[in-house]
Image: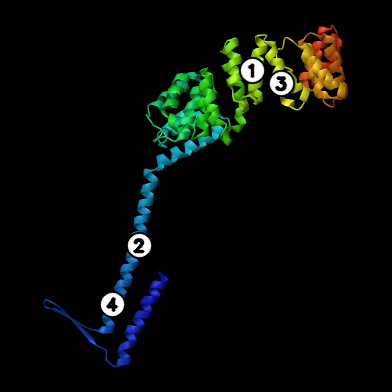
Amino acid sequence: MIKMILWVVLFLLIVALVPFVIGEKGYILIAMGDITIESTVVTATILLALLFVVLIMLLKLTRGSLHLGFGAWNKIAFAGRRRGQRNLHQGIAAFLLGDFQQAEHLLVKSAEPSRQPFLAYLTAAKAAHLQSKSANTDHYLQLADSQSLSLKDASLESILVQLNVLLARQEFNKARTIIDEHHKHIGHDARLLGLEIDLCIEESRYEAAIDRLKQASKNKELSSRLPAWYQRIYQGYFAQLDDESLQQSWQKLAKKTKQVPEVLLAYCNELAKRNIVEPIQKLLLPVIKKGADIQLINALKYLPLTSIEPFIQAVEKQLHKDASNTLWLSTLGHLAYTGKQYQLAEKALNSLQTHSDHFEKADAVLYAKVLCALDKHKQANQVLLSITE
């Protein structure tokens, strides 16, 4: 504005000085009907310039008042929406902080005003479910369903929330309908793929879950969940097979899959339950002899083995090389207890307690069980007291 005024002043000065420089003021004659106006060029120019400045000022004032008017109207017209969005944000924050009662209240209150009813009702349903309010959960899910939103209309996150609620409520048929509707997106989004695998496990569709695992193993976002999935899926899959099919299925597995510890242990666990001894020994005795896979050796201790002696002998050979090795002492104690060789188990676990800086809780509990089996209840109590201090 200041810049413009300076230009106008400069223009007026030029106009005022030019007639004096050329020695001619110049005249303007304006005739409108019977009215005649006579003026000099300088006077007319000054008047026009002043009129121009007045028009600019009026325009500025008009724009400001219009802006003020629209701003006030906007505040009044959209106050409800802004309040709804604020309640939505506060409700989500309360949900994340664990205040599910407040979250439910705010989310339901914000559903319509915020214009995000689908997300608000779904999150409210989750909050109600975590409070064990079944009636409220059902009501909010119905309200969410009434929105009739497709994946194009709702965000993928909203669909994921809905699936989480349905899985938590064990409404697997509804979850399957939603998954199948958006099946083309599975594999592109890790979260949806993960829910698909969880659903397959709950439905006992283990072969379908195995197919999904192939996709999940290529996704870095799901890598932390793979061990638990391998364990649950293959335990369920092997349990469904008869004895002959069980061993045939193992032979058909890819070499890389057989090397997954959770898959190997699931297979051996199922063999042990059925008292099929020879395949277990072929698979696990080399693991003990090599002594390199600590995860498998630790897991071996908890298998329901029936033919224990070959494993005990293999562990004792390792202890001949290193009598104070805590891994092998613990393994021997567990295997001996499983085989009801309580005196051997007591000897191994007592030595473990002597050589170990920290007596693991699982080993201490087992030691107490062994002592009880030998009618040494006082010593068993002392062992249990030592891990509670």
> At 74% across and 26% down in the image, what residue appears?
294
**Which of marks 4 and 3 precedes in the sequence?**
4
Relative depth, front residue between 277 and 106: 277
Mark 2 and mark 1: Cα distance apart in space: 83 Å
Q: Residue 23, relative to residue 52: is it above or below? A: below
Q: Report how far apart the C-alphas of labels 3 and 2 lie in the structure.
A: 82 Å
Instruction: Report the mark closest to the observer, 3 or 4.
Output: 3
Q: CA distance from mark 3 to mark 4?
A: 100 Å
Mark toward the start of the polypeptide (4 vs 1)? 4
In the rendered structure, which amino acid carries the disc numbered 2?
A: Leu
Give the answer, above or below, for where 182 lies relative to 244: below
Which mark, residue 299? 3
Determine which of the numbered discs, if any, sits on residue 267 in the image. 1
**Label 3 element class:** helix
Residue at label 4? 47
Pointer 2 residue: 61
| Cβ atoms under marks 2 and 4 closer than 8 Å | no
Which callout, 2 or 4, points at the residue further toward the start of the chain? Answer: 4
Q: Secondary structure at mark 2?
A: helix
- Characterize the local packing of mark 3: few (<14), some (14-19) or many (20 or more) Cα atoms within 10 angstroms: few
Name, please, the residue furthest toward the left.
34
On the image, the x and y values in percent for residue 216 come to 55, 31
x, y percent for residue 337: 78, 11
Q: Give the SS element for disc 4.
A: helix
Q: Is residue 323 visible?
A: no
> Label 1 amino acid?
Tyr
Q: Quadrant of residue 389?
A: top right
Name the amino acid, label 4.
Leu
